[in-house]
Image (tube, rainbow, N blue to C red):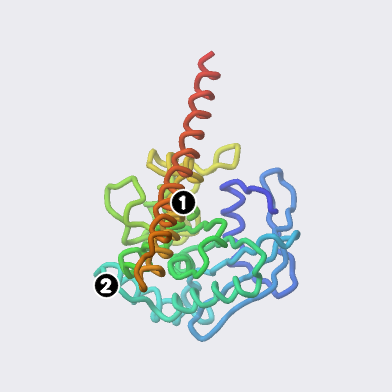
Amino acid sequence: MSRQYTDHERQKIANEEYTKYSETESMEIINDKGEIEDIGTVRQVIENETGIKVYVVESPDKSEVSVLYEGSKAPFDKGWEVDWFENDIPMAQNILKGEEGVTSQLKAAASILDDIMLEYPNAKISVYAHSLGSMNAQYALANVRDISRISGAYIYQGPNIYPVLTKEQRQRVDAIKYRIHNYVDDKDLVPIGYPKNRMDSVGVVGMMHHVDSVQQVDFVYSQHLWGGYVFNEDGSLKIKNDRSSFEKRYSSGLDKVSSGLYSYAKAKEALASGGYTSGEELFLDSEHALTISSGLHEVANAGYEEIRSIVRQAH
């Protein structure tokens, strides 16, 4: 299994979506120890008429596949018109109006993610994306068939597409909310559609991390390309005092509850078509109780360990 990367290393992996790779090449980063680290082998480079570009990277031990959605091409680069005029601008209009519906590139992103999961049935899936790629990732995660396969998602500086999702899509992406890390630098002009003056993750795809950034002179280009991000010595990203620190701390228990209740609702829906037998009702009730109690138990344990840590520090 791939090791746990720091925030800084995750950002570097996401940035590789803008590097040109061919199939069978190794994707590498300079890790926080200053060493060259092999993230994995590029197995697929997916492009089509919608303007989308996706890298599929298999980890050295084959236990994990990383899916990298590229952001918008720079103006006047080859293919930039499709990204901007057929995807960025129409999506911005839908988000600002709160109208349901997405563009062809976002739909392609969802189809591609499901295909990847079928091609690598034994691997966990990690998703990385930036800008337009973030919108692609958000929509793909909102439509993924098997939520249990998603190990984590790390998306940066993209507009919030939660308002344009259907009720069913919102339920699905909420089920894996605590596996999705959604980073936004408020000084960047691109991430639109997020609730104003709120420091929680309500109405957002994933856990909202408000980046404690520095203002760049080039507030359009550099600010958007992670220019304002500041990392601590341990590789963690400087975040404002928002709710994400709490959500991240208890994410394992919260995820058990949210994903478990989603699966429970789907099982209940499937059984409801023919009416419940007494045995099915008992099964559903027990599953409901088990899901909630298991999640609460994990959250309580995390809280207990945190209190013990505080006591040790006080001593």
- Of 305 and 138, the residue lying toward us: 305
- Residue under pointer 1: 178
Question: Within the image, what quadrant is residue 82 found in?
Answer: bottom left
Q: Is residue 44 left or right of residue 277?
A: right
Give the residue type at disc 1.
Tyr
- Of 15 and 115, the residue lying toward us: 115
Residue density around tag 1, few if under 14, some if 14–19, many if 20 or more, within 10 Å: many
Report if residue 218 is visible in the image.
no
Q: Measuring 44% from the left and 56% from the top, which residue is drawn there?
A: 283
- Residue under pointer 2: 99
Q: Measuring 71% from the left and 43% from the top, which residue is drawn there?
A: 33
Q: Is residue 312 left or right of residue 280?
A: right
Give the residue type at disc 2.
Glu
Secondary structure beneath disc 1? helix
- Of 74 and 30, the residue lying toward us: 30
Closer to viewer: mark 2 or mark 1: 1
Among the two numbered marks 2 and 1 on one chain, the one whose residue lies closer to the N terminus: 2
Secondary structure beneath disc 2? loop
Question: Within the image, what quadrant is residue 40 found in?
Answer: bottom right
Q: Disc 2 and disc 1: Cα gap in Å?
A: 26 Å
Residue 69, percent from left and from top: 54, 68
